[in-house]
Image: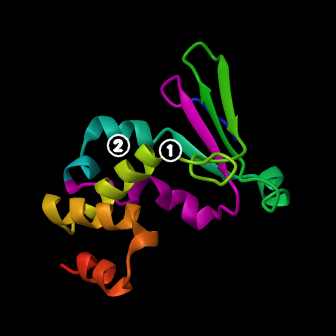
Amino acid sequence: MLGATKGRMIRCTVPGLTPKSSGDLAHTGPSRSRQRLHDQRLLELVSRVKCSPSDEADRNEHEFNLCELEIVLKSGERQTVRVAYHRGHFKNPMTDAEMQEKFRSMAQKHLSVDRLDNLLRLLWALETQPQVGTLIAATRT
């Protein structure tokens, strides 16, 4: 499963991963820009990433959300990190600041800074909003 390509290899296991989806992992996601898709250094690194299904993760998917990252260094030494509960899982919750930062990074593509600030203000005071229409109106572009 692990082979050395130019001296290093990265392997990750993802529950429910299929061979088709594993090949797509390096090329999808909201943070990818056209420029990064043609960055030769990034493409060279991505070519050394191997994602594989994990029987252990699939067996335990209802108990925890296992993610394992293994890196093989040029020396052949392997370093592994396992995370049972990803950041944002209810057993490993994000802080308010992390949630707000993530929300801003995703919403800034659709809303001006002023509108985004207003929407966040409304969301943080959601329990006090007399009508949901105010919140919905703040999301419209």
Horizontal arrangement in the rendering, residue 116 relative to residue 30 (left or right):
left
Q: Which image quarter holds the N terminus?
A: top right
Which image quarter: residue 80?
A: top right
Q: Can residue 112 be seen in this view?
A: no
Which image quarter: residue 70?
A: top right
| Chain part drawn in magenta | 5-34
Query: Dot 1 corresponds to which residue?
Result: 95
Query: Sequence-wise, which precedes: disc 1 or disc 2?
Result: 2
Q: How crowded is mark 2: few (under 14 residues within 10 Å), some or many (20 or more)?
A: some
Of labels 1 and 2, the one closer to you: 1
Residue plotted at (27% across, 76% down): 139
Does 101 sit above or below residue 115?
A: above
Residue plotted at (70% across, 36% down): 82
Amino acid type at circle 2 is Leu
Horizontal arrangement in the rendering, residue 13 relative to residue 31 (left or right):
right
> Helix, strand, or loop for circle 2?
helix
Amino acid type at circle 1 is Thr
Does 18 sit above or below residue 12?
A: below
In depth, the one of 89 and 29 nearer the eye is 89
In depth, the one of 97 and 73 nearer the eye is 97
Horizontal arrangement in the rendering, residue 111 relative to residue 124 (left or right):
left
- Give x and y (percent) for residue 30: 35, 60
Does 8 sit above or below residue 55?
A: above
Label for residue 43?
2
Residue plotted at (24% across, 55% down): 33
Q: Residues within 10 Å of mark 1 (few under 14, many from 20)?
A: few
- Give x and y (percent) for residue 98: 43, 45
In the rendered image, the residue lying farthest to the top is 75
Residue 21 magenta-highlighted? yes
